[in-house]
Image (spheres, rainbow, N blue to C red):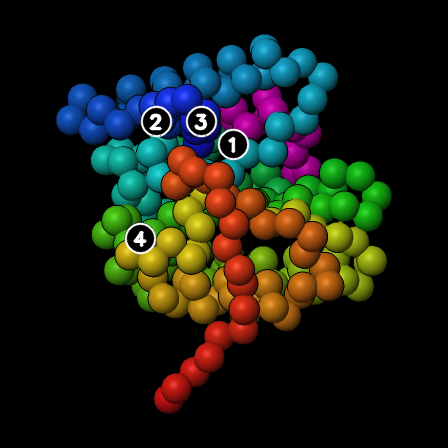
Amino acid sequence: MVSFQDSQSTKKCDFPPHDIWQETWASQLNRAHDTLVHMREKLPGFNIYPTLGNHECFPESLYYQPRADYKNLNMKTSEWWQLLFPIPPDQLENIQYSLYYTVLVKPGLRILSFNSDYGYTINFYALLNHKTPAYYEQMKFMEETLHDARENNEKVILIGHVPPGDIGNTFLEYGDFFTDLVSAYSDVIVLTTFGHTHFDHFELVISTVKYW
């Protein structure tokens, strides 16, 4: 996802754009490909670390890893993301599987990118998360990555698309998991960054309070 906004304008832009009644799988994939190629051409010599947004799918905002169409999306995306940064072979498998990965940017600093569509309420397929092994495997992957980073004295930048504190657009379980994870590894995580809202803002992460 790429978004643009300035203080003089309220115009917003995603790739693919919000023309949801004109979309097809072909249009979604073509726009994603063209945008990533354009980014590569305009930022030569720089590594670009992407994360999955909610508009790359068809219909937009729907993602369900077990379906063939989404497996194809994963494979195509893994090809194009290789234009943006060197992907380690084991992480290429993770991207092809469910569009999450980690990469060591330089000694002591690691990127962890995860698929936030599993926590997005507009993704109606997310109601089947309890039947989706990839959903649980991503959570396990995130925790293991942070654990290993701590053991190796690394710091981690955590990136996703849909922020978990976006109440009304995210499941409580997603927020609880993210909050507990960030709280447990606050000594490791140096930055969490998201897109989706089209606004510059900050969110405070505090330990979850349970009343039951």
Residue where numbered disc 2 is placed: 10
Q: Residues within 10 Å of mark 3 (few under 14, many from 20)?
A: few
Element carrying mark 3: loop
Is 212 rendered above or below residue 5?
Answer: below
Magenta stretch encompasses residue 88: yes
Residue type beneath disc 3: Ser
Could you tell me how far apart the alpha carbons at marks 1 and 3 are, in whole angstroms?
35 Å
Badge nearest the viewer, 1 or 3: 3
Residue type beneath disc 4: Asn
Could you tell me how far apart the alpha carbons at marks 4 and 2 are, in whole angstroms?
21 Å
Which residues are the magenta region?
79-89
- Circle number at residue 112: none
What x and y, as percent, mark residue 176?
Answer: 45, 69
Residue where numbered disc 1 is placed: 78
Residue where numbered disc 3 is placed: 7
Identify the image quadrant of the C terminus.
bottom left
Among numbered discs 4 and 1, the one appearing first in the sequence: 1
